[in-house]
Image: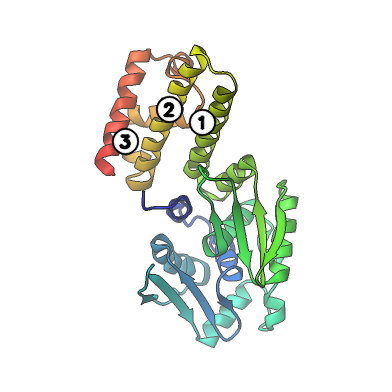
């Protein structure tokens, strides 16, 4: 697949509805503090993410009452889109919305008053991740990070995450400050919180598969070979559901298939028999529906 896990995750986040105005504002705050330039003279955000290119102008309009102008397309190995705002009056309205003065030093920290509500904290982190975050393909290793060149912003994001019950780590690299997670469960929780439950599920399914394979490597016997088949089947189903979610969305499925998809996502580790028992369906009926889901995903690829 040409689409990396990080890009797919961001595309999923960009499908999240803009929601309440307080949250749109908080998401913009995360985007701006983690973007390329955020000063009283200029706001500049450079992204390769097409989904963000669509989301950003709407988000700005919702938060500030005016859209950020159309981006300039910068072709290259990977096409980049540059959003730039230099209208100082508009920028000062943005600073006002965050309760900041036009002083650069003041801008470079998080005004926690904007993030009092839980919904807004999640939105802030979504914005920060969309502008300055990345997540490694979980098939390789578990790593999610938020990168900014503002020391205070990074420190305060770290504290905010601690306060929210996470256990992030900190580091720096070439003048940038990084808050990161290395544990799969923390990455899952973070992704779910900021609005990417499908990415979190894929990560969880991969983790289950990895753990199972490790178990199999430790004690090879007939039983574990069956377990491996179970895991492979579940993986295939979850990937198919992921493809549908990313293209048409699960809501496009007929109701019965949608229910089956949700059931599978909620129980990634169960065998088909266990899933059938849990749902009160027959195994053959469930198996038929799973096949349908996989067929649909193949037409979408
Ligand atoms: Zn909110």
The quadrant in which the C terminus is found is top left
Q: Are marks 1 and 2 in contact (CB under 8 Å)?
A: yes
Residue nearest the observer in this picture, 275 or 60: 275
Question: Which quarter of the figure has residue 249?
Answer: top left
Would you place residue 289 above or below residue 34 in this image? above
Q: Which residue is mark 3?
A: 253
Q: Answer above or below: position of 163 versus 208.
A: below
Farthest left residue in view: 299
Q: From this view, report whether residue 232 is shown above or below residue 72.
A: above
Q: Which mark is residue 209?
A: 1
Please report whichever mark, 2 or 3, sits nearer to the chain's N-terminal start.
Answer: 2
Does residue 210 sit above or below 3 in this rendering?
Answer: above
Residue 256 lies, in percent from the top left, at 34, 26
Image coordinates of residue 262 in percent, x first then y, are: 44, 31
Is label 1 within 8 A of ligand 1 (CB to nearest ligand atom)?
no
Q: Secondary structure at mark 1?
A: helix
CB under 8 Å between discs 2 and 3: no
Q: Residue at x 55, y 74 (%)?
A: 36
Q: Is residue 22 visible?
A: no
Point 66% across, 62% down: residue: 178
Q: Which residue is mark 2?
A: 232
């Amino acid at each position: 697949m040409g689409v990396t896990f990080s890009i797919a995750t961001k595309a999923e986040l960009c499908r999240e509805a803009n929601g309440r105005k307080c949250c749109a504002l908080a998401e913009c705050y995360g985007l701006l503090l983690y973007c390329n330039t955020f000063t009283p003279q200029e706001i500049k955000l450079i992204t390769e993410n097409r989904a963000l290119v669509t989301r950003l102008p709407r988000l700005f309009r919702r938060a500030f009452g005016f859209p950020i102008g159309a981006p300039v397309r910068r072709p290259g190995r990977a096409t980049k889109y540059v959003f730039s705002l230099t209208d100082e009056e508009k920028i000062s309205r943005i600073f006002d919305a965050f309760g900041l003065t036009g002083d650069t030093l003041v801008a470079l920290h998080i005004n926690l008053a904007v993030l009092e509500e839980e919904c807004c904290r999640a939105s802030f982190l979504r914005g920060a991740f969309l502008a300055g975050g990345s997540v490694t393909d979980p098939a390789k290793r578990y790593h999610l990070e938020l990168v900014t060149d503002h020391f205070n912003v990074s420190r305060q994001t770290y504290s905010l995450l601690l306060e929210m019950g996470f256990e992030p780590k900190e580091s720096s690299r070439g003048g940038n400050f990084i808050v990161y997670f290395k544990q799969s469960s923390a990455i899952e929780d973070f992704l779910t919180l900021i609005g990417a439950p499908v990415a979190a599920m894929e990560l969880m399914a991969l983790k289950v598969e990895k753990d199972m394979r490790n178990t199999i490597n430790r004690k090879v016997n007939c039983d574990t070979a069956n377990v491996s088949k179970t895991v492979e089947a579940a993986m295939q189903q979850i990937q198919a559901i992921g493809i549908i979610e990313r293209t048409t969305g699960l809501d496009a499925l007929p109701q019965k298939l949608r229910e089956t998809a949700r059931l599978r996502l909620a129980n990634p580790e169960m065998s088909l028999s266990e899933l059938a028992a849990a749902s009160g369906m027959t195994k053959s009926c469930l198996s038929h529906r799973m096949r349908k889901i996989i067929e649909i995903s193949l037409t979408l690829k």
